[in-house]
Each structure stands twice: as structure tokens, then as C-alpha cells.
Amino acid sequence: MNHKLQHITEAGLLALYYKERDNVYVGELLSRYTLRLLGVCMKYLKDEDDARDMVQQVFEKVLAELGKYEIDNFGGWLYRIAQNACISQIRAQKQFVAEEYLVYVPADVEPDTRQFWEKEQQHERLQLALEQLKPDQKICVSLFFLQKMSYQQIAEMHQYDIKEVKSYIQNGKRNLRLIMEQMEQAENVRK
């Protein structure tokens, strides 16, 4: 922490950065958020080394992106970057196989490839539909249904209240169903 800058507010540091484009101001801002950022990354990644690596990646992204935008709420923006980066890493590491694909098929029985491809297409539609949800809905639906987190855990992790989480999940689930129905209709029209 730079002792000459520690008395300057977050808004003041941002204003100085945008005026002078000197990364010393960004460094001061980042130093103020390092521990909180590490905590956020630990909540997602559950491993201290991975979390520390992620903090460094987030710092690099901030340095690359801050000049492109006028940020009013640095802490909120930084939190979103960290959150999205952690979720991306979790997705990249998660190579799970759904239970229905682990069914034993005797060697002399021909597997039903049509059924397999239908389920595979449905899974792809679900992923595409998730990407079309509003960010808060996407986060809550993904964490609740895919990572089996409780409303309380989601609320604490993302600084929502329980009612917001419930609303995001309900609306996200409804919107997901509508999007998937539209996708299926579009596919049927093309056939």
C-alpha cells in the first residue's frame, strides 16, 4: 500500500487514473481489495493456491480492461471479474459425465445411438439457453441446479438477499424453459 495514496478515496483514485493513466493508482485500489478478492476466489475454487493464481489473473485482467471503461463502482466491477473468472475456471475443470451415460450395456446388445444423440443435443441446448439468461439468473440457476448450492450459500457468495436468489432462480428456470422450447421449435421448423 502506497502511504501517499492511502488517504485518497476509491473514487478519487479512479479519477486520478482516468486523468493520468498511471497504474500506480490501480495498484493502490487492488491492494485495498486483495484479501477480499482472495476470499471470493477461495469460496469458488476451494484451494488456496488456485485462489492466489486467480487473484493474479484478475489483477492482470483489471490492468488490461480498466482503461476501456469508465468504472463508477470499482469494488463491484472487480468482484464481477473475479466471479466470472472463477466460474469459467470451474467450468473448464468440470468434465463430468451424467449418470444416464454410465448405464451398463452388455457387449452383445447394440447401444441406442439415436437416444444418446438426442440427450447430447438436449444438453447442448441447455448450455446455449443458460448463456442467454440475464447474468444474475444464470449465476443463481447454475449454482443452485448444477452445483447444488443452497439459497443461503448463493446469497452469501454473491451478496444477494434470499428473496433475490429465489426470484432469480424462479425467473431463470421459467426463462430457461421458454428459451429451450423456442430452440426446439426452431429445430423442428428446420427439419
Image: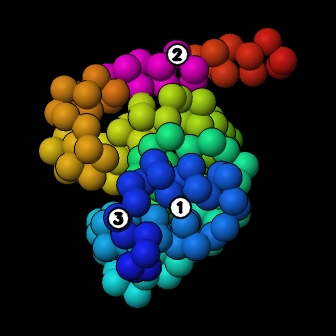
Q: Does residue 7 appear anywhere in the picture?
A: yes
Q: Amino acid at mark 2?
A: Leu
Q: Which residue is mark 1?
A: 85
Which residue is more in the foreground, 14 or 53?
14
**Looking at the image, is mark 1 or mark 3 nearer the viewer?**
3
Look at the picture and state if 5 lies above or below 91: below
- Say whether marks 2 and 1 touch (CB < 8 Å): no
Q: How is the image coloured?
A: rainbow
For the point 84% across and 18% down, the residue is 190
Q: Amino acid at mark 1?
A: Ala
**Looking at the image, is mark 2 or mark 1 nearer the viewer?**
1
Q: Secondary structure at mark 3?
A: loop
Q: Secondary structure at mark 1?
A: helix
Q: Secondary structure at mark 2?
A: helix
Question: What segment is highlighted magenta in the picture?
Answer: 170-180
Image spot of residue 170 (x, y percent):
31, 22
Which residue is more in the foreground, 179 or 116?
179
Using the rendered view, name the quadrant where residue 124 is placed. top right
Q: Which residue is mark 3?
A: 7
Answer with mark 3 or mark 2, whichever residue precedes in sequence.
3
Query: How far separated are the C-alphas under marks 1 and 3?
Result: 30 Å
Q: Which residue is mark 2?
A: 178
